[in-house]
Amino acid sequence: MKNLQFITVQTKPFQVYRILLVLALILSSSSCSEFVEVPLPNSQLTGTTVFESELTANAAMAQIYAQLRDGGILSGLPTGASVRMGLYADELQDYTNSTISLPIYNNALTADNATVASLWTSSYSQIYNANSVIQGIENSTDLPIAVKNRVSGEALFVRALVHFYLLQIYGSIPYITGTNYEINRKVTRSAADEVYAAIAKDLESASTRLPENYSSSDRAKPNKMVAKAMLARVYLYMNKNTEAANEATTVINSPLYAWETDLNKIFLRNSKTTIWQLASATAVRNSNEGTTFIFVSGPPPVCALRTDFMNAFETGDQRKVNWTKSVTAGLNTWNHPNKYKLRTATTSSQEYSIVLRLAEQYLIRAEARAKQGDLAGAKEDLNKIRTTAGLPITTSSIATEILSEIQKQRRFEFFTEHGHRFFDLKRSGTADGILSVSKSGWNSSDILWPIPELELNANPNLQPQNTGY
């Protein structure tokens, strides 16, 4: 296929990357996941030249999706948030004993930790590339308006999405909307409420630009509902409960989605509960999560589900039956996540990496409704999750009980999915009470990761360091 290659060069300070495009499309049988690190050429394509073709605009976004899949916070590889935040909270136990993973598992991070730095730099590289697409589209004179709206909407969505995850992990961060090196190297951090407002603004803009229907049959490119689904989450985190419930309702009522009662079908590539997913690198590969989490012999090569997590499932919960699997060797038994069932290639891809799915919208709306006093509506949404898991409807009758049950269901619905558990503990104010018991190294200041030491040294405007580091 024809593959549009990005050329990147690392720029310091702030560890963002300059995005360029080669002078021509080249034939390649490889995936769009490689970045080629080369010196800056003497001449560079301008944004207007790059984005005169829908083909090159689509290829630029395909490269960004490949980055999300294979590097940074959203990757299903061991370096992504599904593993890192699972270890950091109370979902996973580390079996690598590496100098990189153990400090995460033991809540003993330092500002010079390699993962602390890599998640930051890879995320801002992705943001920078999204900004380059946005600017290129804005400067384009020949692209049809529908194409300009769709591609810029996709890039705005990615920019908001990655900033959202950075905010959860590092706290106060810079919100980067441009590609000017001299400006970016001197940026300051914005307060959390300002970052949330910027994220919401980008998602609102994306939702007005993106088409109603998916532009790819595998739901690997965002549409309007994808932006609204993420906006529902952001509004919930901002305690804008009316807005969160409204956005979630719009997604739930969309004819694009249908509820699935078979737990073993939810993580298939063609599931109607999938709102947005990252396509595999080739037509025969499956999700990175399957490769990362599934093991067939012990001890586990990377991680396993913690025993206390497995013991916390409610009796009869079919998610424990269908979404976890045990491996025994001698006297030892380990459990791994089994949401994704395939760890190797198949004749054609059967599982992609799901980022947003319908169950979250029901639990968002349940929480937002409960906080607004609509307990009947909250219980209706909550019971959608419980009954699908094989559990009886809730007997909770007051708001505090219903909210507690919603958080419990979020724990078992979204385990090892991009850090949901840790983010929920953080936003609910329960992290100290829970993690100080289950994690021997937990301190209150661990609620945020440190800002990478290299970044602070390169740009003093990022000071002060987060408390405790």
Image (spheres, rainbow, N blue to C red):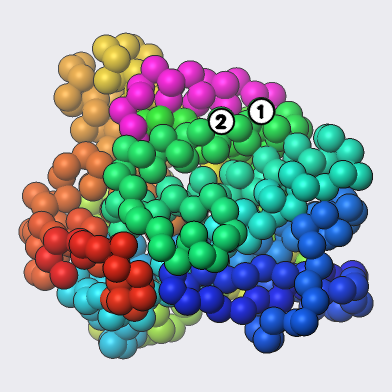
Label 2 near label 1: C-beta < 8 Å? yes
Location of residue 68 in the rendering, given as x and y in whole percent from the top left corner: 58, 62
Q: Nearer the viewer, residue 441 or 303?
A: 441
Q: Please say if 228 is above or below 75.
A: above
Q: Position of residue 163 (x, y in %)?
A: 45, 51
Q: Quadrant of residue 394?
A: top left
Q: What amino acid is at disc 1?
A: Thr
The quarter of the image holding the C terminus is: bottom left
**Residue lying at 83% horizontally and 35% vertically, measured from the top left:** 146
Is residue 69 a member of the stretch shown in magenta?
Answer: no
For the point 86% across and 78% down, which residue is it? 28
Q: To which residue does mark 1 refer?
A: 208
Compared across the picture, whether 76 is left or right of 88 comes to right
Q: Position of residue 208 (x, y in %)?
A: 66, 28
Instruction: Please determine whether, in this image, residue 72 is positioned above or below residue 275.
Output: below
Residue 78 visible, this angle = no
Give percent across and percent down for residue 5: 77, 73
> Disc 1 versus disc 2: distance between alpha carbons?
7 Å
In this rendering, the answer to whether 158 lies above or below 92 is above
Residue at numbered disc 2: 204
Residue visible at 51% across and 24% down in the picture: 247
Q: For mark 2, does the 10 Å Cα neighbourhood hold few (<14), some (14 to 19), or many (20 or more) residues?
A: some
